[in-house]
Amino acid sequence: MANNEDLFKKIISHSKEYGFVFQSSEIYDGLAAVYDYGQYGVELKNNIKDHWWKAMVQYNENIVGVDSAIFMHPTIWKASGHVDAFNDPMIDNKDSKKRYRADVLIEDHIAKIEGKIQKEVTKAKKRFGETFDEAQFLSTNPRVLANKKKIEGIKNRLYPAMDNNDLEDIKLLIEELGVVCPFSGSKNWTDVRQFNLMFSTQMGSLSDDSDQIYLRPETAQGIFVNYLNIQKTGRMKIPFGIAQIGKAFRNEIVARQFIFRMREFEQMEMQFFVRPGEEMKWYEYWKEQRIKWHLSLGIPESKYRFHEHDKLAHYANAAADIEFEFPIGFKEIEGIHSRTDFDLEAHQKYTGRKIQYFDPEINKSYVPYVVETSLGLDRTFLAIISYAYTEERLEDGSERVVMKILPALAPIKAAVLPLVKKDGLPEKAREIMDFLKFDYLCQYDEKDAIGRRYRRQDAIGTPYCITIDHQTLEDNTVTIRERDSMGQERIAIENISGIISKKLRSVK
RNA sequence: GCGGAAGUAGCUCAGUGGUAGAGCAUCAGCUUCCCAAGCUGAGGGUCGCGGGUUCGAACCCCGUUUUCCGCUCCA
């Protein structure tokens, strides 16, 4: 475990040192849980996106893409359940360090008082036996009435306070009631705080409540609200899917572990619309398809596992995660959820518009069911660099750090290196660079000994190095050096591009 | 969010009250060598930030911010 923590730190250092990932706003001391992608990071990230987009949109005739805006109508987040389900007042007990929903603490207190009333009833029942009239007892017994009044009073404070977001009064109420922490038994509470995981901002010049809009906490809703547009204009027939890559924002209470959990992150999502009743078939289908995609990244199966959810989110009737074994352990990288008709049904209700599909095969209209695949791009990035980071001891006793990134995903595909910086070798190398750069992202380097230049390319995961030597000037051949094996082959200049193309494809 | 630890050059770190350092990396030149660590030279740091104590603070104190670890939370 200590070793793995160490490895994780090394990966973070390497990411920074070689221009993959930087802390956001670093020269201003940084911004918590926000990161920037550097010159090589952005290439790798773009390659991952491209690889996913092809696998989803290009290779599946019934999946199309969309790019929806980050700003969306605020009511969408009411319909999706994000406003209500994740807008709770929280309070911490300073002694036990436990966090509670403040309203639940008060509700529990009410339940306690109700328990007292129930006790009185049980006692009275014993005393009066057959002749006991419960309704009369409840409406006349002074102790019961006092407790009822107490409950009434609490509710009259709690509910308006909840509605008005009056956090101070909720805190006051907890103090006045003498609510204690079930763990520590203490009344040492923090202030009540609202943890809404959605970021909000104002649209328009007036900043009253009606103008408040949110930064989307997931990209999925951008797909759902475009369902009708795309289904109609794309003449899509069920089953079909809509894919999207885009940023999402969550104001995480605890956001940590490098780019694993960020406040601003990127999702690659596909919502697949199916006939109700067939969702489990497609759920299984997409689980299989998605794990295949992960394996196509050149990472072995042992690094992945499925985790089926027991506790389902408010919208799902089946859900599984694909987990990857990061240096920090197995963690979720992708979710495959059967979302039922929850989202489309909700948008139908909130907009009053019919969001349905007429299925000519069964001659029926219905709200489609949805199977979602939702992949974290940043987590995929982290998985790839975690797996790729390799420290090797070579035969001569020296060490090298190699990023064994799948060549198709590597930031730089080839480096063009003149063996020495004289005898016309740089000029020849420039010539090669000038045509190769139209086919791939290449890098030219003539500084330092050839071995050192190879190591530099290893550190950023460049799969191929083209070396121009004295023989090149005689017969127009170069050597191509492969990153992982360090083996070299002599090939003709005119074949370089074709050979690299072939290599990039063959290892996919 | 709570508790603990840390923040000095791009990286890894030394320096514990008295003129900011090393190795590696970077850049220029020499060397021309197919797998780092040859030679010469150069650049780069308001010691995370702010305040305080002191004749004097990288060092002591307070606050703050960022990172890491544990707890907590996670659509």
Image (cartoon, coloured by chain):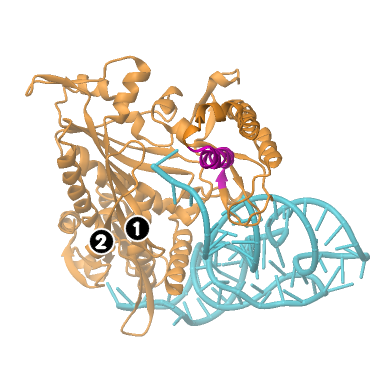
Chain colours: A orange, B cyan
Using the image, name the chain to which the residue with label 1 belongs.
Answer: A
Dot 2 and dot 1 residues touching (CB under 8 Å): yes
Using the image, name the chain to which the residue with label 2 belongs.
Answer: A
Q: Quadrant of residue A429?
A: bottom left
Residue underneath mark 2: A299
Which quadrant: the N terminus of chain A? bottom left
Residue underneath mark 1: A383
Same chain, marks 2 and 1?
yes
In the rendered structure, which segment of residues is drawn in magenta? Answer: A100-129
Q: Earlier in the sequence, mark 2 or mark 1?
A: 2
Residue A339 among magenta residues: no
Q: Quadrant of residue A115?
A: top right
Q: Position of residue B16 (x, y in %)?
A: 77, 77
Is residue A21 depicted above or below B26 in this figure? above
Residue A112 among magenta residues: yes
Q: Find residue A195 and name its label.
A: none
Q: Amino acid at mark 1?
A: Ala
Q: Position of residue A131 (x, y in %)?
A: 49, 32
Query: Mark 2 to mark 1: distance in Å?
Result: 9 Å
